[in-house]
Amino acid sequence: MRSSSTAACRDMAERYFEPGDVDTLIPTLTRVMAGIMRANEQATAIAGRLEAERERIGQAGGGVIDRAAWKADMEQVARLTETVKAGLAEIMGMGGTIKDLALGLVDFPHRRQGRVVNLCWKYGESCVSHWHGLDEGFANRRPL
């Protein structure tokens, strides 16, 4: 059983953002999210190419691969994955929660009319101008 003082402390420790708070983060969010999105896209493309090569070899019953190129691609995917992880950690450190890498969606907790909701920022937007409920997503976002 959780004590009410523990719940109260947890609630007080939670940071709630106002639209202006998020707006001040947008230059950094934009820079970090651009790097994350680029690295994710590149890693996905390389991984797709490697998977297609695996399938081709499997269907042919074997084959010769350029081991040096394969190793270089695997190392590049690992580097790109680390870039994505570092960017995700940086955004989480700002208080945001990444919802979609491809679209560049980041949510920030906000109190609106007595309830907790998410301010919803999308990569490319110059300010946060939308929100949605905690159990809703981008498709249900509404203007502030």
Image (tube, rainbow, N blue to C red):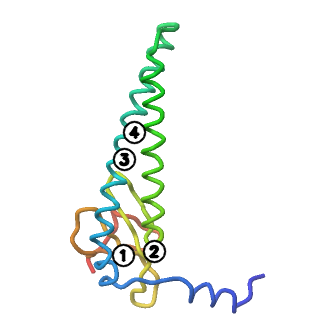
What residue lies at 44% left-to-right and 30% top-to-bottom? Answer: 72
Q: Find numbered disc 4 in the image and state the secondary structure of the residue it sits on.
A: helix
Spatial CA span between label 1 and label 2: 11 Å
Q: Residue at x 27, y 81 (%)?
A: 144
Q: Nearer the viewer, residue 10 or 142?
A: 10
Tell whether label 1 touches label 4 (CB within 8 Å). Answer: no
Please name which of the two marks, 1 or 2, marks the residue nearer to the observer. Answer: 2
Earlier sequence position, callout 2 versus callout 4: 4
Residue type indicated by callout 3: Ala
- Mark 2 or 3, closer to the camera: 3
- The disc labelled 2 sits on which kind of residue? Gly
75 vs 20, left or right, is right
Return the residue at label 3. 39
User: How far is the residue under mark 2 from the one under mark 4?
Assistant: 26 Å
Asked if residue 128 is positioned above or below residue 12 in the image, the reply reads: above
Q: Counting residues from the N terminus, which is met first, the one under dot 3 or under dot 1?
A: 3
Q: Quadrant of residue 137?
A: bottom left
Query: Residue most toward the front?
Result: 68
Q: Which residue is the site of mark 4?
A: 44
Residue indicated by mark 2: 95
User: What residue is shown with label 1?
Assistant: 119
In the rendered image of this protein, does residue 77 appear above or below residue 128? above
Dot 4 or dot 3, earlier in sequence: 3
